[in-house]
Amino acid sequence: MEQLSGRHAVVTGGASGIGLAMATAFAGEGMRVVVADRDDEQAERATDQLRRDGADAMAAHVDVADPASVEALRDRVHEELGPVHLLCNNAGVAVRRPLVETTPEDWEWIFGVNVFGVVNGLRAFLPGMFETAGERHVVNTGSMSSLRVGVMGSQTMYTASKFAVLGLSEALRQELEPHGIGLTVLVPGPVATDLARTSELARPGRTRSAGAPVPSPSRPSGPVAWMDPSEVGPLVVRAIRDNRPFAVTHPQLWPQVAGVHEVVARAFSERPGVP
């Protein structure tokens, strides 16, 4: 998707962090941007700032876990803006909790946002994108946890959900290709976002188990340099323009990912039934 200026972009979870960084980068390329978020006040503040910077931006409410809410977003965007050329399914939540301490409601919440939020966005917007002429693209926000496990600890639910986003995206790419729609999976490593706070605000009361601490998954610490969210936006723009299947924020983490692949490769090289 080389031509961005004048095109329309929808970014879920667009009011802060990586979502806002993408919306800002798209606006800088001359796109008309919809900042969609469940936090209406934050979305309005983000949109006001974009407008002050000269962007054509619109704030919109959405709860990505609710199909009806996503469909209402689609209808409003089509009515007020027109066809969507770029869809970024970015909204996500995280919580750290050992699996044995999780509840069915915890899993429903995490997968409702991180996985079904992506599904709901795709189901709502893709039919219209199929009928739209010109270049079009989808960005699904995964995680470095889509590719490797065990770095943060007690992240079973989050990691499982982000693995699901990766598998969904890889399968979907084949479905989109005949329609001329590109797809990029954003694979962020440590990015200094407000994910811990926004996740806690988004948690339904029934998932807030007593005595279950929720340390920030985005608190800068550890040996890898944490990236400012503003650096992610231009990276995504380049990936969209080049129709790259992945946009990776921290290529220096490749040895960890390669280690996972090496274990799989060894399993394929072993002869079944031979000790």
Image (spheres, rainbow, N blue to C red):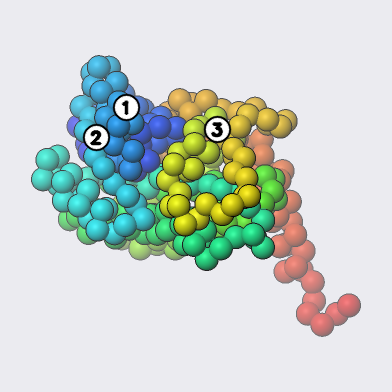
Name the residue that disc number 2 marks: 59
Comparing marks 3 and 2, which lies closer to the viewer? 2
Residue where numbered disc 3 is placed: 191
Gap between marks 2 and 1, in whole Å? 8 Å
Residue 7 at x, y percent in the picture: 22, 36
* Residue at x 29% of width, y 36% of height: 40
- Badge 3 marks a residue whose secondary structure is loop
Residue 75 relative to residue 221: left or right: left
Closer to the camera, 151 or 22?
151
**Does label 3 or label 1 sit earlier along the sequence?**
1
- Residue drawn at (21%, 33%), measured in percent from left and top? 58
On the question of residue 185 being in view, the answer is no
Q: Nearer the viewer, mark 3 or mark 1?
A: 1
Q: Nearer the viewer, residue 86 or 179?
A: 86
Q: Residues within 10 Å of mark 2 (few under 14, many from 20)?
A: many
**Structural distance between the alpha carbons of marks 3 and 2:** 24 Å
> Which residue does the numbered mark 1 point to in the structure image?
46
Label 2–label 1 contact, CB within 8 A: yes
Percent of width and height locating residue 238: 42, 33
For the point 43% across and 52% down, which residue is it?
204
Q: Amino acid at mark 3?
A: Val
> Callout 2, which amino acid?
Ala
Cα distance in 3D space between marks 3 and 1: 19 Å
Q: Is residue 39 above or below residue 258?
A: above
Q: Nearer the viewer, residue 164 or 243?
A: 164
Q: Residue 44's x, y, as percent?
A: 27, 30
Identify the image quadrant of the C terminus.
bottom right
**Image point (29%, 59%), residue name:** 67
